[in-house]
Structures are given as C-alpha cells and as structure tokens.
Amino acid sequence: MSTTPIKIDFVSDVVCPWCAVGLQALQQAIDRLGDEVAVELHFQPFELNPQMAPEGEDIDEHITRKYGSTPEQLAQNREAIRARGAALGFTFNARDRVYNTFDAHRLLHWAALEGHDKEIALKHALLRAYFTDGEDVSAHAALARIAAEAGLDAGRAQQILASEEYADEVRTQERFYTERGIRAVPSVIINDRHLISGGQPVEVFEQALRKIAAST
C-alpha cells in the first residue's frame, strides 16, 4: 500500500478550548490511518482577542461581554468542553483569566523553523500550560520556560520575546487566513482545498482524511 502525502494547516489560538479538543481529535484520527498517510501538519496563527490588554481579562467577564452568555450557559459550556477533553485524554482545569497570545504565536513561528517536532511539542505545551495549569501564556518568563520544556532554547526564546522578531511574519499569516474568510477556530485546512471547522470528533477527521487520501 502506498502512503499518501497530506498537508494540514491547523488555524488556531492557544487560548481556544475547542482548538485543544480539535487538535487532540485530529492527531488521534491521523494515528488511526497509520502508514496510509504521511501528514505534514502546520500550525497557523489566529488571535481570538487581538486587542486583549497585556494583563488579560477575567475569563467569565470576557465571555459574558463577548457572547452574552449567562452564568448557567458558562457552566454548561465549561462542562461540555471538560468532558470532550477528558474523552480525548486532555485535562481542562479551572482558569481565571484569558490572555493576549501574540507572543505565543511568535514563538510557535520560530519553533516551526526549528523543526516539525519542536513546533508540535510547543503547541501542546502551550495548550497544557493554559488549559491544564492555568498559566499566563502572555508572560515572557512563562513562555521561555514552556519553550524550554518543549525542547527549545530558553535563551533564544527570551531573545525573541524581548524583540519584535517574527511579528511581521505572524501578522502576515493572520491576515492571509482572515482574508480568506477564516473567522472562527479551529479551522482545519487540508491540501489547501478542504475546510473542516470546529473541534470535530475523531471519526469526522478520520473519514475526511480517508476520503481525501483516496481521491489524491
């Protein structure tokens, strides 16, 4: 059986809970296909709150203001996300604040240049740091430590964070996807043609990948 190459652009933010769910499901779907596909996975930047202040915002106040959610809806949504995460092996714990993620995206851009494995490791480390550990993923000290945990050089990470390095590249990529109609994340773009939106179940990603691989 020949192996079909598939390119996936995973457009997401590191403070987007459905992005964490979607990534877990996507990677489990890829694992199910095994040697049938050779997936080239790239993480593309999207900021849910590009105007977020450096100190962040209380998460309940933020969601209520942005979406008009009631306390009951907040609790229901939080439990639904927690349950979906648990079923996929990802732990969502209580979080107090939501943060600006631009610097996290700059580090992800750098990690991609350092190697595919580094990019994936940093993405997962950032998602865990925020959703599981409740860390401030805008704080430079935290970001440098998270980068080191993902196998990257902490000193180089600090150097990038103290500068504007990769800022233009991240903004260019963000514009690229918003200009093509991406308004919500996760958005999973396969072979630059097929779009799957949202934190779909493993089976949805698996069926889509099988169908695309068969037609490639």
Image (cartoon, rainbow, N blue to C red):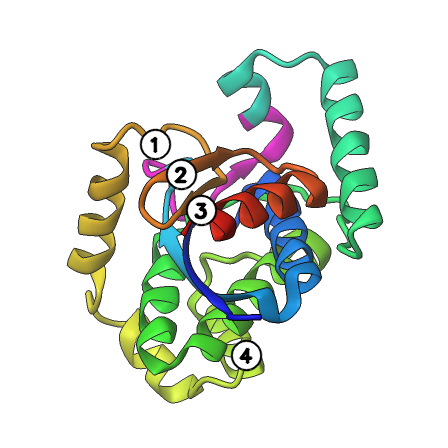
Q: Marks 3/2: CA distance?
A: 12 Å
* Amino acid on which the number 4 mark rests in the picture: Ala
The residue drawn where x is 51% and y is 83% is 148
User: Which residue corresponds to mark 3?
Assistant: 215
The residue drawn where x is 70% and y is 60% is 32
Image position, residue 180 (x, y; %): 24, 32
- Earlier in the chain: of badge 3 and badge 1, it is 1
User: Which residue corresponds to mark 2?
Assistant: 194
Q: Disc 3, disc 4: CB below 8 Å? A: no
Q: Disc 1, disc 4: CB below 8 Å? A: no
Q: Disc 2, disc 1: CB below 8 Å? A: no
Secondary structure under tag 2 reads strand
Figure quadrant of residue 176: top left
Location of residue 121 with respect to 99 vertically, above or below:
below
Is 214 positioned to the left or the right of 127 in the image? left
- Earlier in the chain: of badge 3 and badge 2, it is 2
Front tag of 1 and 4: 1
Badge 4, how many Cα within 10 Å: few under 14, some, many 20+?
Answer: many
Q: Marks 2/1: CA distance?
A: 13 Å
Q: Disc 4, disc 2: CB below 8 Å? A: no
